[in-house]
Image (tube, grey):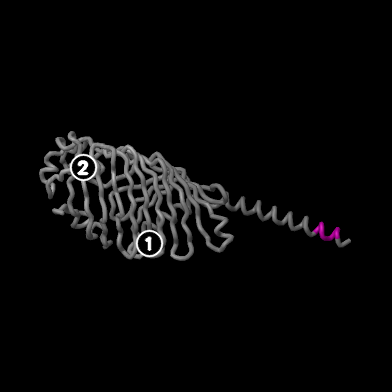
Amino acid sequence: MATKAGRMLGRGVAYALVFLGAFGVSLWRSLPYDEIASAVETRLQAQGLTLQVRGLGPGPWFGVRAESVKVEPPGLAVRVGVSGLEVWPSWARALRGRPALRFRAAAAGGTVEGEVGSYGRVPLDLSWADVALGQIPRPPPWKELPLAGQTDGSLSVDGLRQSALEARGRLQASFTGVRIGPGKVRGVPVPAVGLGDGVLEATLEGGRAEVREARFRGGDLEVLLTGAAVDLRRPLGRSPIKGGLVSLTPNQKVQEDLALLFALFPGSRSSDGRYTARIRGTLQAPRLLRR
């Protein structure tokens, strides 16, 4: 009798779980996604962030999917967009009491994916692959200058709950086949220049962003930037640049094409063919000074 009662109880629990699961799936699929997208857009717009979400609906793993998402950060004349965005709970972290969301999307010809947590200082881990530089929106006047090449990399930030001045972060990126021009910047002609392949490594901590190393090699113009630091301020363009050396090593063609630039460069060419200067000023108005 006890065994029969146990089987009946187990069967009842199973039926209940099936019912609850079916109810949950039905509820998840029937949510008013258009109204949710509109509410999120309105709320962020009140905070100065323009957001457009199109085709929001149910996604994998009890998540959501949007056909396209476009964001226009405040104070920047650019609009960043992704397509096929999927967001779903990180169930493994949820079981450990650290709720987080996983996401992936297509962006600028490549892919972007990562995870953002809602615990502690709110961490973010982001990675990207095969992103086309020419498809990344750029503010004026740089959008007038053609840019080619691809980039892979990662970004880790700890402290999204705080402002950017209090967050800690690390950026690592690699670049292949980078080429700029021909085009114009503020009406000034810029010839075609190949930078080749490069790497960038930067950190953010204590309100200071530091470029540990940025270099490009294998092209018409080799570039090396070391020791540059920026004390972050508001607005961001007025952040002062503290230290840093930039070195340019052109081949003969670029030496001739950019003759005016190198004639005005603060410092003569060294015996190894390199021009080197110190960087000062602000992000919106950097200056090159003699080393």
Q: Which mark is residue 168?
A: 1
Mark 2 element type: strand
Which region is colored magenta? 3-8
Disc 1 marks a residue whose amino acid type is Arg
Question: Is residue 108 something one can see in this rendering?
Answer: yes
Sequence-first disc among 1 and 2? 1
Residue at 29 percent across and 46 percent down: it is: 215
Q: Where is residue 170 in the image (x, y as percent from the top left)?
A: 37, 56
Residue at 32 percent across and 64 percent down: it is: 165
Furthest residue toward top: 253
Residue at 48 percent across and 61 percent down: it is: 118
User: Splitting the image into 4 quarters, where does residue 211 fall?
Assistant: bottom left
Q: Where is residue 52 in the image (x, y as percent from the top left)?
A: 40, 49
Q: Nearer the viewer, residue 64 or 92?
A: 92
Say above or below: 36 vs 207. Answer: above
Q: In which quarter of the image is the C terminus?
A: bottom left
Say above or below: 221 vs 43. Answer: above
Question: Which residue lies under the disc numbered 2?
Answer: 249
Query: Does the magenta stretch mainly form a helix, a strand or a loop?
Result: helix
Q: Where is residue 204 in the image (x, y as percent from the top left)?
A: 34, 59
Left or right of 18? Residue 213 is: left
Q: Is residue 57 magenta?
A: no
Q: Nearer the viewer, residue 186 or 148?
A: 148
Q: In which quarter of the image is the N terminus?
A: bottom right
